[in-house]
Amino acid sequence: MSNTTGEMKLNSVGAVAKKRGKLKPQQAAALKQWIFTMLWRLAIVGGIMALWEIIVMLELVNPFLLGSPSAIIDMAGAMLQSGQLLTDAYATVKATVIGFAVGSAIGSLLGLLLWFSKTVSRIIDPFVVALNGVPKIALAPMIIIWFGSGIFSKIVLASVATLIVALLSAYQATHQIDASQVNLMKSFGASKLQIFSKIIVPASLPWIISAFRINIGLALVSVVGGEFISSDKGLGHMIFVEGNLFNLPAVWVGVFTLMLVAALLYACVSFIEGRLLPWNDNKQAHKSASV
């Protein structure tokens, strides 16, 4: 009897494990679509690289002006071996992430707090809009003069660039909330702080996260722009120096590294969105776009 009971338990556990391991039809379809998309992407990239190499080998284009995939790979290997590429990439990523986090956090908080006072929001609205219209890279010379040519000035530049977008997005989010929900809370005697914490902030999260997606790119562009102007390290500095030396393979290494960094940072923001907004209907679409 005990053996029979043990066998039944093992069979039931095996059935559950088998059931858990089996993908749902939607998951299987999504996985199949992802694999299909990735194969097409790899095929396109491989085709472009092969065509590029052939054009250079046949000397249809001057290799000095265009470079070649083989030369770029050799240069990337040399830079990795010397440690230059990792050092420059780390400096850029560090300034981007810190600037993005500081600017997005402060901007989102200020945008949400403006909900408490319509008078203050009306007063500062034209100033915020005007500052948002100014290309942030135009502020780089002043920021570098004020804070020096080190990494701190790049962090400040990225923070300024992301703060305005986060502020506007969070402020607009507070005005998109259904007024009936707020009125319902008021009818139950809820204070303004309770309405803010229970209704305004949770309902504004999708807008704030959407601003994060924009801000991660703005932060990277701002940091690289600042490195172009004045810096002793970073991918922007590397591209600027190697460009002045007409070292096209090294320039391409910097550009491709920036593309990889941008993709990884965007994927991180998508992961954060999935954790903060598990109920978001657009989660799957955003995940597909990020890969």
Image (tube, rainbow, N blue to C red):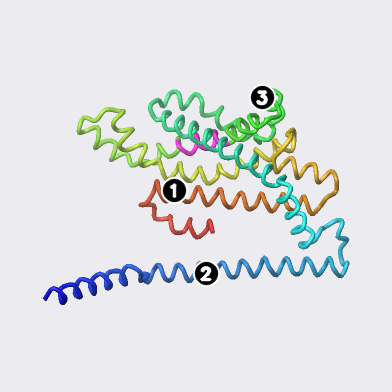
Chain-order first, disc 3 or disc 2: 2
Image disc number at residue 35: 2
Horizontal arrangement in the rendering, residue 111 relative to residue 260 (left or right): left
Q: Distance between the residues labelled 1 and 2?
A: 23 Å
- Residue at (38% x, 27% y) in the render: 116
The segment highlighted magenta reads 162-170
**Residue 236 forms part of the magenta stretch:** no
Indicate the quadrant containing the N terminus: top left, top right, bottom left or bottom right. Answer: bottom left
- The answer to which of 132 and 8 lies nearer the viewer is 8
Name the residue nearer the viewer: 99 or 8. Answer: 8
Q: Is residue 88 left or right of residue 219?
A: right
The mark that comes first in sequence, 3 or 1, is 3
Q: In this view, does 221 lie to the left or right of 4?
A: right
Q: How far apart in space, not on screen, are marks 3 and 1 (Cα)?
A: 33 Å
Q: Which amino acid does label 3 sit on?
A: Phe
Q: Position of residue 153 (x, y in %)?
A: 65, 29
**Residue occupied by mark 3:** 147
* Secondary structure category for the residue under label 2: helix
Identified by mark 1, the residue type is Glu
Q: Residue 19 carries which label?
A: none
Q: Which residue lies furthest to the left in this view?
A: 1
Q: Earlier along the polypeptide chain: callout 1 or callout 2? A: 2
User: What residue does disc 1 label?
Assistant: 273
Q: What is the three-letter code of the residue carrying label 2? A: Ile
Residue at the (79%, 54%) spot, across then down: 249
